[in-house]
Image (spheres, rainbow, N blue to C red):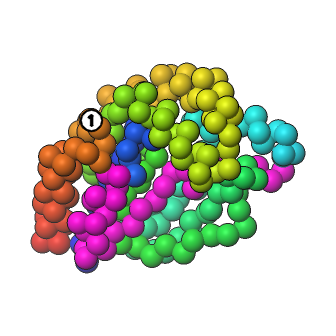
Amino acid sequence: MSNRPVVIGIAGGSCSGKTSVTRSIYDVFREHSVVVIEQDYYYKDQSHMTFEQRLETNYDHPLAFDNNLLIEHIHRLLAYESVEKPVYDYVQHTRSDEVIHVEPKDVIIVEGILVLEDERLRDLMDIKLFVDTDSDLRIIRRIQRDIKERGRTADSVIEQYLTAVRPMHNMFIEPTKRYADVIIPEGGENNVAIDLMVTKIKTILETESNL
């Protein structure tokens, strides 16, 4: 066990390929012990709101996230303490009653569209990545995902993209690229960038274990 877990932040636009990059890194460090903390599990609880009010939520705005809880959980994992990760119900548009028990690991991957937007989160990260993918690919992937996994219609996904996702991307997500240590074009398809990240993470882990 290293003295302090390595924290990797993986940001990028909706459906940019963050999950593919995360999975590639996870597969390499599975033996080392790695945990993934997804920012979109930390959408704020909206159980106090009517269903109609919940439908108005802008999920691509920084204020949609409960970053205070996310940061608290990362601090606990850094101290090698377990946490109960919340689960979000995308059909009911609020936090589920379920939680996921997460044990501390040597590598913590924090993945989400706005994980580089909050300075408090950035300060906890050893490596900051931004997955950069063309907008046309991202909207196609989002339509496919939301219909299949979140019970949405194509029209509703497109309307949300035009009214919230695209403007929020330009206003809040794209500017966080400046904070990234490495920008990865085309997400999980960029094996060279992923290999470089794997090498860097291994170096940090070896350094920590020798302290």
Q: Is residue 144 left or right of residue 211?
A: right
Q: Can you see residue 47?
A: yes
Residue 143 occupies which quadrant of the picture?
Answer: top right
For badge 1, the amino acid type reads Pro
Q: Can you see residue 61?
A: no
Which residue appears at 62% of the width and 62% of the height? Answer: 87
**In the rendered view, would you say 73 is above or below 3?**
above
Give the labeled residue for mark 1. Answer: 185
**In the rendered view, would you say 138 is above or below 65?**
above
Query: Residue 56, percent across and down?
Result: 76, 34
Q: Is residue 25 left or right of residue 42?
A: left
Instruction: Label 1: state its secondary structure.
Output: strand
Which residue appears at 85% of the width and 40% of the height? Answer: 52
Task: Indicate whether residue 103 is drawn in magenta.
Answer: no
Query: Count of labels shown?
Result: 1
Query: Residue 83, percent across and down?
Result: 53, 71
* Front residue (pair 50, 123): 50
* Front residue (pair 119, 63): 63
Which quadrant does the C terminus fall into? bottom left
Which residue appears at 29% of the width and 38% of the height? Answer: 186
Q: Within 10 angstroms of label 1, few (less than 14), some, or many (20 or more) residues?
A: some
What range of the chain is rendered magenta?
A: 20-48
Which quadrant does the N terminus fall into? bottom left
Query: Residue 185, percent across and down?
Result: 26, 35
* Front residue (pair 118, 211): 118
**In the rendered view, would you say 2 is above or below 55?**
below
Query: Residue 35, percent across and down?
Result: 39, 67
Q: Is residue 178 left or right of residue 198?
A: right
Which residue appears at 29% of the width and 48% of the height? Answer: 188
Task: Indicate whether residue 33 is drawn in magenta.
Answer: yes
